[in-house]
Amino acid sequence: MRENEVVKRARRDEQQGKSPSTQAGEFVREEMHHVREGKHGARSPQQAIAIGLSKARRAGVRLPPPKRGKISARSRSQAQRDIRKGQRSGGSRRPSKRRSRAILRALRREGRSSASHANLSRQAHRAAQRRSRRARHQT
């Protein structure tokens, strides 16, 4: 799936009045496809999800950073940085070629099983367990 196609889908979700997390889901879905097709790997399903959420924030999806205590302070500040980057319009600075290559090479060394059906199912189950009974049944 191409990047601009994912952005179009997220924009369509926004126009239909869907929540920011639903819009960001398109980016997470794309990231899972990348891992499955072997573009790169991920250490865990959580890492693949985090990459997708970061891309969504940078693309302008109004997804708030995680609450304090839910995640490390470093991840929270990175999420805030992504949000600021997504709010900037026009051509932002080009990403560092050296850093981009280093990140991609590091991700390629990771395994591909983090996007498997079993691992994603386990991740979804654990995420649901962290929510209250009432929160799980809200539509």
Image (tube, rainbow, N blue to C red):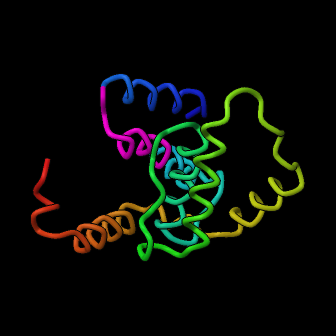
Which is more toward the observer, 111 or 127? Answer: 127
Residue sitting at x 53%, y 30% = 7
Q: Residue furthest right?
A: 98
Q: Is residue 63 above or below residue 67?
A: above
Q: Which x, y percent locates residue 104?
A: 74, 57
Is 62 a magenta residue?
no
Q: Is residue 122 left or right of residue 76?
A: left
Q: How many marks?
A: 0
Q: Which x, y percent locates residue 106?
A: 74, 66
Residue sitting at x 26%, y 74% = 130
Q: Is residue 117 left or right of residue 133?
A: right
Name the image quarter holding residue 111.
Answer: bottom right
Q: Which x, y percent locates residue 82?
A: 62, 50
Name the image quarter holding residue 116.
Answer: bottom left
Name the image quarter holding residue 73.
Answer: bottom right
Which is more toward the observer, 138 or 66? Answer: 66
Q: Is residue 12 left or right of residue 97?
A: left
Which is more toward the observer, 37 or 70? Answer: 70
Q: Which residues are magenta?
A: 17-28
Residue sitting at x 30%, y 64% = 124
Which is more toward the observer, 96 or 73? Answer: 73
Q: Which x, y percent locates residue 53?
A: 51, 52
Q: Is residue 76 left or right of residue 63?
A: right
Q: Secondary structure of the magenta portion, mostly?
A: helix
